[in-house]
């Protein structure tokens, strides 16, 4: 857009961007600084932003406090969350992409009806299923698998893959199939490798949703030995009086894995979102 | 639940595509039939089997963990079921629904929740879509460090809502030590007192809206940015040769160029804004957020089920809510469609 722009205009662009970015980053900055400050200085007016008395003590305290059988172990909470997210993301990529391929590129009677059903199920908010799901799986409470299995099949992921696969030129598949490759080989050897952006985008979205998942663990998990990290955060936060420095340190540790995943996939992610939202 | 789940299935992209996509497999079948060797025929004809097998795991999972529970919710809504009650569930007919709309004790909070949901959606959809568009346009320039800015605006999207709630609880804390209060105190030379942003029913919803937009807008921004980048640069060059002003360029090049994307984003935002739950729940339980001014329908369903142990009533709320969401999606589709057929 901006091919030849006056320096003044360019300066104005930067100024507007900088002000907006500053407002957006303030809460994040507050989180980071607060996590490094003694607790008394966090909720302390504007001086909460002063970088004084910085140390990693809060982090050490969080890890120390959550390091016994009665409180549970911090690394175990994180391990549970990572394991659940891993199962949901990898399992989801596999079954949802396969289903989308079956529904978008193979012709069979009833596939339109099945896909419509998927779209309809996409409208059901998870919160509205919490009540019946809780009722149905009461016996499976406090297990790890019940935290993951219900979220592997995901209507929105199927929809995203479906949208992407449909935009692949049919000539690519035809060539493979004339060479004698069946639908499974065509899918795994030809389609999957060329669909990296949508896989990355679905993986990130699923991971984000799963990592923040709160309501389901609240209902299904009471035992600290299978408790995921966000749930532990709300337990940790409930202490009286609240130790804000430690709570914010806990928050940083909670968001760190997501930031790492995001940094790793970012390039594909933007492409993937683009391809699934914007018609090419 | 995060920003990112549902999307209107009826958005323009999928609507446009089936014709494009139906013909190729047909031609594939035809070429297969026309080849003289009969062996080629068999694998093609068994596409239905492979298609079914490939779809089966995901469809089975969706039926088991979405379809069946939803049907179960419908059934439960016709019963008087209470958690932990020694009494067996008894058939209740439409009583739960009648109470929801006519029993003052129940219909009061429920209708309030509906109203709150509506307020949230009516403010957030234009606000968040507009802000996302503004950010996307600002970022769609060949400036240095644009990637850095994009990451900064997107960063809150990766924050779990439980964490967002904690951060904003401190920013909006009601004591004069709260960040916003002390900032106001400083700029007004001490003339503005401390506000209870979350606890005051006048500002509670606004607070929830601000933190929700902060957390979510980066996602819409990325989608819109992708849409903007698909507009050919020559269009802008041509517009500049015609001495079009910046506004005219926006009106006649940018907007038409991203109309599809914009509709997609607005639909996505409205579906998401209807299921708002996490931030409200976390901030009411231990954040001092005013309950009556911010309860949403999903909040109402969950608290009815698990705080009041009234499963039947909660199921009825769920079913009514689902019907409303479907109805709104259909209406939105009708409203948006005529615009969109270009």
Image (cartoon, coloured by chain):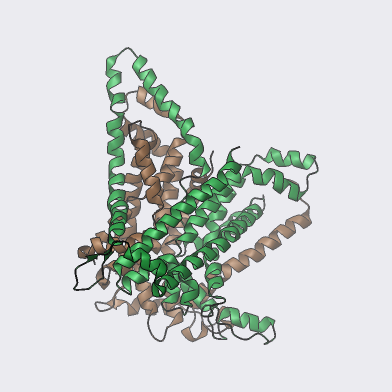
Chain colours: A brown, B green
Of residues B89 and B213, which is closer to you in this image?
A: B89
B93 to the left or right of A116: left
Q: Residue at x 75, y 38 (%)?
A: B238
Q: Residue at x 62, y 86 (%)?
A: B193
Residue B244 appears in view: yes
Outermost residue, top side: B36
Residue A77 appears in view: no
Of residues B150 and A67, which is closer to you in this image?
A: B150
Q: Position of residue B247 (x, y in %)?
A: 74, 50
A141 to the left or right of B10: left
Q: Position of residue B199 (x, y in %)?
A: 51, 80
Looking at the rendering, which quadrant does residue A194 occupy? Answer: top left
Q: Position of residue B158 (x, y in %)?
A: 47, 61
Figure check: A144 above or below A64: above
Q: Position of residue A230 (x, y in %)?
A: 37, 68
Figure check: B322 above or below B27: below
Total labels drawn:
0
Q: Residue at x 47, y 75 (%)?
A: B292
A218 to the left or right of B225: left
Figure check: B27 above or below B12: above
Quadrant into which the C terminus of chain A falls: top right
Q: Residue at x 65, y 52 (%)?
A: B137
């Amino acid at each position: 857009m901006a091919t030849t722009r006056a320096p003044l205009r360019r300066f104005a662009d930067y100024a507007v961007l900088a002000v907006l970015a500053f407002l957006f980053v303030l809460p994040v900055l507050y989180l980071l600084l607060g996590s490094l400050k003694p607790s008394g200085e966090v909720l302390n007016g504007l001086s909460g932003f002063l970088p004084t008395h910085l140390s990693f003590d809060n982090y050490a305290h969080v890890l120390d406090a959550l390091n016994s059988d009665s409180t549970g172990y911090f690394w175990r909470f994180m391990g549970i969350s990572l394991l659940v997210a891993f199962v949901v993301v990898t399992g989801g990529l596999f079954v949802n992409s396969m289903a989308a391929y079956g529904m978008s590129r193979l012709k069979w009677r009833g596939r339109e009806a099945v896909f419509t059903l998927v779209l309809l199920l996409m409208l059901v908010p998870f919160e509205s299923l919490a009540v019946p799901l809780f009722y149905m799986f009461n016996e499976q409470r406090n297990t790890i698998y019940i935290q993951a299995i219900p979220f592997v099949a995901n209507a929105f992921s199927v929809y995203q893959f479906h949208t992407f696969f449909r935009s692949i030129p049919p000539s690519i598949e035809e060539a493979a199939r004339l060479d004698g490759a069946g639908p499974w080989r065509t899918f795994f050897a030809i389609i999957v490798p060329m669909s990296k952006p949508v896989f990355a985008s679905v993986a990130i979205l699923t991971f984000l949703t799963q990592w923040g998942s709160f309501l389901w663990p609240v209902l299904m998990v009471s035992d600290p030995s299978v408790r995921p990290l966000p749930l532990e955060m709300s337990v940790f936060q409930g202490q009286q009086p609240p130790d804000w420095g430690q709570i914010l340190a806990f928050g940083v540790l909670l968001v760190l894995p997501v930031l790492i995943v995001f940094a790793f996939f970012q390039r594909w992610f933007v492409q993937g979102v683009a391809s699934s939202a914007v018609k090419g | 639940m995060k920003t990112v789940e549902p999307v209107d299935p009826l958005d323009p992209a999928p609507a446009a595509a089936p014709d494009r996509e139906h013909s190729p497999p047909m031609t594939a079948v035809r070429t297969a039939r026309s080849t003289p060797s009969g062996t080629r025929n068999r694998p093609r004809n068994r596409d239905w089997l492979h298609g079914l097998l490939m779809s089966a795991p995901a469809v089975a999972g969706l039926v088991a963990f979405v379809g069946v529970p939803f049907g179960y919710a419908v059934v439960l809504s016709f019963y008087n079921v209470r958690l932990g009650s020694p009494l067996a569930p008894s058939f209740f007919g439409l009583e739960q629904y009648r109470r929801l709309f006519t029993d003052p004790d129940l219909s009061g909070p429920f209708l309030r929740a509906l109203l709150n949901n509506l307020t949230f959606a009516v403010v957030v959809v234009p606000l968040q879509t507009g802000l996302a568009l503004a950010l996307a346009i600002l970022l769609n320039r060949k400036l240095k460090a644009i990637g850095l800015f994009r990451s900064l605006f997107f960063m809150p999207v990766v924050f779990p809502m439980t964490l967002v709630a904690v951060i904003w609880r401190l920013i909006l804390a009601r004591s004069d030590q709260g960040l916003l209060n002390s900032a106001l105190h400083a700029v007004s030379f001490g003339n503005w007192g401390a506000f209870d942003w979350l606890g005051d029913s006048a500002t509670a919803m606004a607070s929830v809206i601000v933190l929700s937009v902060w957390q979510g807008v980066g996602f819409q921004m990325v989608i819109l940015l992708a849409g903007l980048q698909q507009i050919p640069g020559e269009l802008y060059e041509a517009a500049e040769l015609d001495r079009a002003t910046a506004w005219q360029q926006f009106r006649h090049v940018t907007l038409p160029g991203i109309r599809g994307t914009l509709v997609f984003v607005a639909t996505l935002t409205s579906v998401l804004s209807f299921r708002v739950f996490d931030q409200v729940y976390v901030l009411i339980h231990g954040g001092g957020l005013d309950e009556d001014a911010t309860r949403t329908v999903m909040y109402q369903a969950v608290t009815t089920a698990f705080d009041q142990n009234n499963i039947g009533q909660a199921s009825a709320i769920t079913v009514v809510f689902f019907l409303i969401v479907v109805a709104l999606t259909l209406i939105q589709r009708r409203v948006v469609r005529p615009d969109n057929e270009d």
